Image: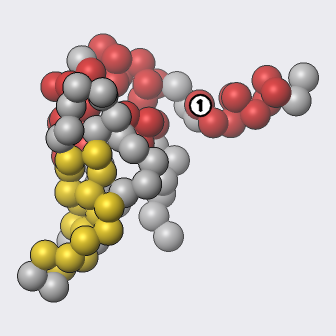
Amino acid sequence: MEDWTSPIYAFFHPVPIIGNHAGRPYHEFRCFAKSCNKTVRRYLDKKDATSTSNMHKHAKVCWGIETVKAAMETPNAKESGCARGSL
Ligand SMILES: [Zn+2]
C-alpha cells in the first residue's frame, strides 16, 4: 500500500474520491480549508504514484508556506497524540 503517513494529508479530507479518467485511476483529495473547494488529483498509475508534490503545492498556496513547513517538520502527529493519551 501507499504511504499515507505524510503530514501533508492533514491539509486534505481523509477520504479521497476514487475516480477514473480515460482508464487511469486516480485519487482526488479535497482541500480541508473551509473556504476552499480545490481538489488535487493524484494518478495511481504514474511512476510517482506516492508523490504528494501536487498536494504540497496547493497546501502552500492555501495554508501558507510556514504552516505547511511546520506540519512537515512534526515527525508524526498521530503517534505523538497517542503517546500523550496513554500517560
Ligand atoms: Zn485549499
Label 1 CB less than 8 angstroms from ligand 1: no
The residue nearer to you, when weighing 57 against 23, is 23
Q: Position of residue 54 (x, y in %)?
A: 19, 46
SS for tag 1? Answer: helix
Residue at the spot x=44%, y=36% of the render? Answer: 10
Furthest toward the bottom, the residue is: 23
Q: Position of residue 23 (x, y in %)?
A: 15, 85
Residue 49 appearing in the image = no
Label 1 crowd (10 A; few <14 / some 14-19 / many >=20): some
The residue nearer to you, when weighing 37 against 9, is 37
The part of the image, by quadrant, that contains residue 13 is top left
Furthest toward the left, the residue is: 22
Residue 37 appearing in the image = yes
Residue at the spot x=41%, y=18% of the render? Answer: 70
Quadrant location of the C terminus in the rendered image: top right
Q: Position of residue 11 (x, y in %)?
A: 37, 34
Return the residue at label 1: 77
